[in-house]
Amino acid sequence: MNSTIRIKALRAKRRKLINKILLTTAGILVAFLVIFPVLWIIPAAFKPKMDIFATPNTWLPKPGRWTWDNFINVFSVEVNGSSFIKSMLVTFIVAVLATFSSLIVNMFAGYAFARIDFRHKKLIWLFILFPMFIPGITIQLTSIRVVNILNMVDTIFVLFVPGMANAYQIFFFRQFYLNIPSNIEEAAVVDGATKLQIFFRIFVPMSITPMVIIGTGTFMGAWNSYIWPTLTVTNNANLVQVMQVVMALNSSYKGSYGVVISATLLSLIVPVIVFGIFQKKIVEGIALTGTK
């Protein structure tokens, strides 16, 4: 009897070990596939033009052929009247404005739909959810028409105001607030707190993790935006976005891939820093959404 139990325990232990090895191997493989392009472009940014696609190719630049010319060209060239460093600064400002404005609007909306009763609430909620099922590209022309009528074209507002209200983000915050125990809010009401005070003193401090998840996604979306700025900012060199510069360099330096690679590498710096700062909260948020 004891030998049978011991055999079953050994089999279970062996099965657990095999599963761990398989999952670890799969994780390493996926991580390598994801990080390989970055590992390739870092040394490629320091290669001269003729060495990037030379045959046979080497991962690192050949001895004595390391060069900073690609980075010098990125910082010296002007695209659409704007330099690369200026476009990075403007894009960062726009991304920060988009993040904070989006969080404020969508958190308020999520709180209202989760905790406040008002007339036609269910009907309005259906209208809020409807845009989630419509691809953004299908309403691009309509959106351009609207911002044109509002005289927002070629202004900084056109880069973040149209995206402030987001159906998915409202839905995300609403679901999070619905899971907060109602007795906390009831205790605050007994103490004389208003809905606004309850929101800022109770719900906002409890929303740090979802705020980081949504805020990081919004920041990355604004940082990597290309189509919308290209369509709505056509005559304002002060609002050229970093992805517009990268794409313009791709057209101007078709044969000089090192310049494009260097610009791409530089454009990754800010997103990597943002992710590094908020990595812990992002992981916590993923774990939180997986247990709800």
Image: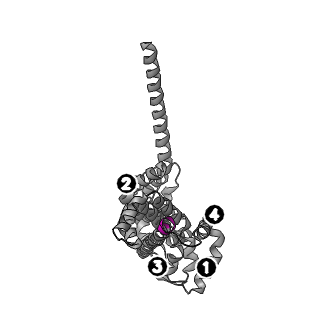
How many marks are shown on the rendered structure? 4
* Magenta highlight: main SS: helix
The N terminus lies in quadrant: top left
Residue bearing the label numbered 3: 82
* Residue interval drawn in magenta: 110-115
Q: Secondary structure at mark 2?
A: helix
Residue found at x 38% / y 56%: 281
- Calculate the distance from the C-alpha at mark 4 to the C-alpha at mark 1: 20 Å
Q: Secondary structure at mark 1?
A: helix
Residue bearing the label numbered 2: 280
Image position of 195 with respect to 213: above or below? below
Residue 79 is situated, as x and y percent measured from the top left of the image, at 50, 77
Q: Which mark is first along the chain, 4 or 3?
A: 3
Check contact, mark 3 vs mark 4: CB within 8 A. no
| Eye-nearest disc, 4 or 2 | 4
Identified by mark 1, the residue type is Ile
**Quarter assignment of residue 262:** bottom left
Residue bearing the label numbered 4: 133
Residue found at x 53% / y 50%: 55
Q: Is residue 256 among the parts visible in the rendering? A: no
Residue furthest out toward the front = 190
Identified by mark 3, the residue type is Ser
Left or right: where 202 falls relative to 145: left
Residue 280 is situated, as x and y percent measured from the top left of the image, at 37, 54
Q: Residues within 10 Å of mark 4 (few under 14, many from 20)?
A: few
- Calculate the distance from the C-alpha at mark 2 to the C-alpha at mark 3: 36 Å
Q: Which mark is first along the chain, 3 or 2?
A: 3
Residue 113 is a magenta residue: yes
Residue bearing the label numbered 1: 144
Q: Is residue 5 among the parts visible in the rendering? A: yes
Identified by mark 2, the residue type is Lys
| Eye-nearest disc, 2 or 3 | 2
